[in-house]
Amino acid sequence: MGEVTFLDVSKRFSLRVDGEVHHVQALDRINFTVKDGEIVALIGPSGCGKTTALRVAMGLDAASAGRITVDGREVHGCGHDRGMVFQHAELLPWLSATQNVMFGLEMKGMRGAPLRETAEKYLQLVGLQDSQNRRPHQLSGGMKQRVGIARALAIDPKVLLMDEPFGALDAQTRESLQAELLDIHARTGKTVLFVTHDLDEAVLIADRIVVMKHGRVQEIMDVPLKRPRPDLGIVRGTPEFAETRYKVWRAIHDGAVVH
Amino acid sequence: MVDVADTTKTTATPASDPPEQRPFPRWVITLASVTFVLILWEIFGRRINPVFGSYPSAIAVAFWDLAASGQLWSALYESLRPFLLGYALAIVIGVPLGLLIGGFRAAEAALGIYVTAGYAMPLVALVPLLILWLGLGFAVKVAVVFLMALFPICINTWLGVVAVPKTLIEVGKSFVAPNIVILRRIVLPATLPYIMAGIRLAVGRAVVAMVIAEFFTTISGLGAVIINSANNFDTATMFVPIIILMVMAIGLNWLIGFVERKVAPWQAEIAGRDRE
């Protein structure tokens, strides 16, 4: 199981700009549910609160009001039931790929022989069995993010939380990782909540798309594309893709006149 | 899944590359520079009254005399003992103290000002007081070296902790690492380059501290050789310990660099300095 529910979640920040205190309502009574095994994309213009929502779900930031539950249990701080994939992978530079994955496992309390075995198993899952001993600076951007995904998956969380995981990658690498994420999802059945600013990515990967604006949920849309989606090139050519992409675009550019 | 962009980008210098133009080795440049300076010094030094200055060949002769009589070695031994102990203590205490101050807000607020102030402390002025507390012997020399070396190490460690990227700490948090584990397994390794820089900076200060201690407490060791030969207007002999101390600092600096590449190899690799 792995169901994430946002219940009236709000988050206020105080910022001091030039001596004046500004209050920012980053999240304003957010409500939605990510069902077990589902992939949900959070999308919206920058500053809409999508990353904040993810950070609150992870427990890195605390909600000012409301609550988040994972399988009915309220989230207080970070937990092993959620695995975080960071925007720039954020691997520990002094550790090899395997050791980076092992770090998460050790924090979960795993010791001894299974530690390395499990880490290697997950590196294999993301296709990095030949680069296990490389340190992060010896890996390309795409490979780093694979390690980041392996690290989060290895602790066998109920939910994978991803913060613009492919946003910093070049277009080609991004596409191959998107396909790989779908492949991993098909094999593990993990619940995934990911933040993106990329319309195509949201439609290609997600089952549902949550459009956010000014800290509120603007609209929640179903993606009428069937699973599995083995060839994203073909998916891009379908009328459903174009139609959904257009609808999401409209929702983001709320009220924009289209000629 | 084959990721073409990935594999090409990460292949380490393929063998088919044309042979790289090897740059001039650093040691050759250093050697040439040192030789040039020594020759200039020899030429101009010979024209000066030997009381007011000296020159390399005269210093070499004085070195030989000091070394042959055994005086140099006993002085060196006498100096090195308090130096090494004080310096080692400064590392053992300065690094954890810096981690503590950098890692905890309350510790920073409570202790930071003493460390900042301590760095600027005019230690020479306090030596008489230290003598009252610790006597004229070994202990006071250790204390002077320790106090001079402690602050650069501590401050650098502190600054290093503050500079650790917040996101790396969040990685620890998101995997539910306890604070002590985050400190030991994330903050400490991320801070290592700063710590090593502090330890390097402290070498120079510790050497100066050692000579000050030998001047102002029991006159002993290399400091004694300096003072006694200066009092006899034997300038060439006076330069021997001075040059030995400078060479020693260079050696220690090199040694620390070597240790740094051993304990934090990723740093040199990231900076692209690993091929030298």
Image (spheres, helix red, strand yellow):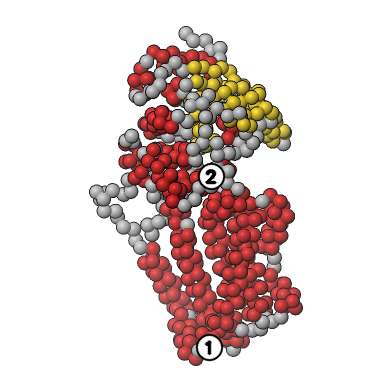
Q: Which amino acid does label 1 sit on?
A: Gln
Residue displayed at 72% across by 36% down: A19
Vertical order, A121 against A200 (above or below): below
Counting the numbered discs, the total is 2
Return the residue nearer the eye: A16 or A18.
A16
Q: Position of residue A38 (x, y in %)?
A: 49, 25
Asked if residue B215 can be seen in this view, the reply is no
Residue displayed at 56% across by 68% down: B203
For residue B233, side relative to residue A247 (left or right): right
Residue displayed at 50% across by 47% down: A110
Using the rendered view, name the quadrant where residue B143 is placed. bottom right
For residue B166, side relative to residue B216 (left or right): left
- Please give the chain letter of the residue carrying mark 1: B
Return the residue nearer the eye: B209 or A211.
A211
Q: Position of residue B89 (x, y in %)?
A: 61, 69
- Badge 1 is on which residue? B71
- Please give the chain letter of the residue carrying mark 2: A
Q: What residue type is labelled 2?
A: Lys
Classify mark 2: helix, strand or loop: loop
Classify mark 1: helix, strand or loop: helix
Q: Identify the disc placed on residue A108.
A: 2
Residue displayed at 38% across by 66% down: B27
